[in-house]
């Protein structure tokens, strides 16, 4: 459904873009990959957002290659490159806002490492006004505990039981940071779920009921905040 595109950040970045059919201008969503890069699951989520009526873009932080082990992207996102990744996402938001197919505001959804980065990126871009984080890995060494630019913005965090639910210290820290910065943050627990419960490509973890509920809540947030 989608295609690879290039856009300007500090250099040139690439991403997978999908546009809704019908021709009407639509709000936009940035989709942030998990540990493994721009894999088929991430592309499928981009396509699903387009089918739901959003222009969707997944930046390719791995530049065409998946990570061979979780320690590679974890090391990258826990370093000074955290700010660079947030800048790339902000550039993606600017790119989407400049496309003729986009009308309205920009949201950001992420998974695992990407969920943490999506939450963080909203504090670095005025354009990103709503975020949906699926089972984020928190806290991150590269994230500050005091965030800014969340005034009037909204976040939701989908928490698996395997990760400690919303009672996890990292989730609580980030929720407090968002609320202190003037935003709202709603957490949802999904009893009996494993990490990556939204990922159909991981049948050992996938939970159809929880995934459907999390998806419906995400669309509800984006339709309310981005239109």
Image (cartoon, helix red, strand yellow):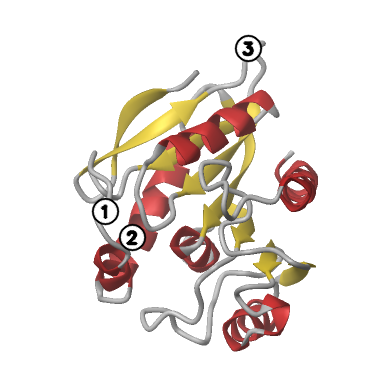
At 39% from the left and 40% from the top, the residue drawn is 39
Q: Nearer the viewer, residue 34 or 96?
A: 34
Q: Earlier along the polypeptide chain: callout 3 or callout 1?
A: 3
Direction left: furthest residue? 11
Mark 3 neighbour density, 10 Å: few (under 14) some (14–19) many (20 or more): few
Mark 1 vs mark 2, CA separation in Å: 16 Å
Q: Relative to 182, is 91 above or below?
A: above
Mark 2 neighbour density, 10 Å: few (under 14) some (14–19) many (20 or more): some
Residue to which mark 3 is pinned: 23
Left or right of 33 on screen, residue 45? right
Mark 2 vs mark 3, CA separation in Å: 31 Å
Judging from the image, what secondary structure is the residue with disc 3 in?
A: loop
At 64% from the left and 22% from the top, the residue drawn is 25
Q: Nearer the viewer, residue 18 or 98?
A: 18
Position of the C terminus by quadrant: top right
Q: Quadrant of residue 55?
A: top right
Q: Position of residue 78 (x, y in %)?
A: 32, 76
Q: How many marks?
A: 3
Residue to which mark 1 is pinned: 67
Judging from the image, what secondary structure is the residue with disc 1 in?
A: loop
Q: Position of residue 202 (x, y in %)?
A: 52, 48
Q: Position of residue 137 (x, y in %)?
A: 50, 72
Which of the two marks, 3 or 1, is nearer to us in this view?
1
Q: Relative to 227, is 155 above or below?
A: below
Q: Relative to 131, is 150 above or below?
A: below
At 67% from the left and 65% from the top, the residue drawn is 157
At 38% from the left and 58% from the top, the residue drawn is 35
Q: Nearer the viewer, residue 20 or 125?
A: 20
Which of the two marks, 1 or 2, is nearer to us in this view?
1
Residue 85's label in the rendered image is 2
Mark 3 vs mark 1, CA separation in Å: 36 Å
Judging from the image, what secondary structure is the residue with disc 2 in?
A: helix
């Amino acid at each position: 459904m989608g295609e690879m595109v290039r856009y300007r950040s500090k250099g040139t970045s690439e991403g997978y873009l999908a546009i809704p059919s019908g021709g009407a201008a639509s709000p936009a969503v940035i989709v942030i990959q998990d540990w493994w890069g721009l894999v088929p699951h991430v592309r499928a989520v981009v396509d699903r957002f387009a089918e739901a009526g959003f222009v969707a873009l997944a930046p390719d932080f791995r530049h065409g290659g998946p990570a061979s082990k979780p320690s590679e992207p974890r090391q990258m996102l826990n370093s000074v490159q955290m700010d660079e990744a947030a800048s790339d996402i902000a550039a993606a938001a600017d790119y989407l806002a400049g496309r003729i197919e986009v009308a309205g505001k920009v949201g950001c959804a992420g998974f695992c490492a990407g969920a943490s980065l999506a939450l963080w990126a909203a504090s670095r871009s005025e354009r990103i006004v709503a975020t949906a984080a699926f089972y984020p890995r928190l806290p991150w060494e590269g994230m500050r505990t005091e965030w800014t630019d969340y005034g009037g913005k909204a976040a939701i965090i989908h928490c698996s039981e395997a990760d400690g639910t919303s009672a996890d210290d990292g989730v609580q820290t980030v929720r407090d940071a968002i609320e202190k910065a003037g935003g709202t943050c709603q957490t949802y627990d999904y009893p009996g779920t494993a990490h990556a419960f939204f990922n159909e490509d991981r049948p050992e973890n996938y939970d159809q009921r929880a995934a459907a509920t999390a998806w419906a809540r995400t669309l509800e947030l984006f339709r309310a905040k981005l239109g």
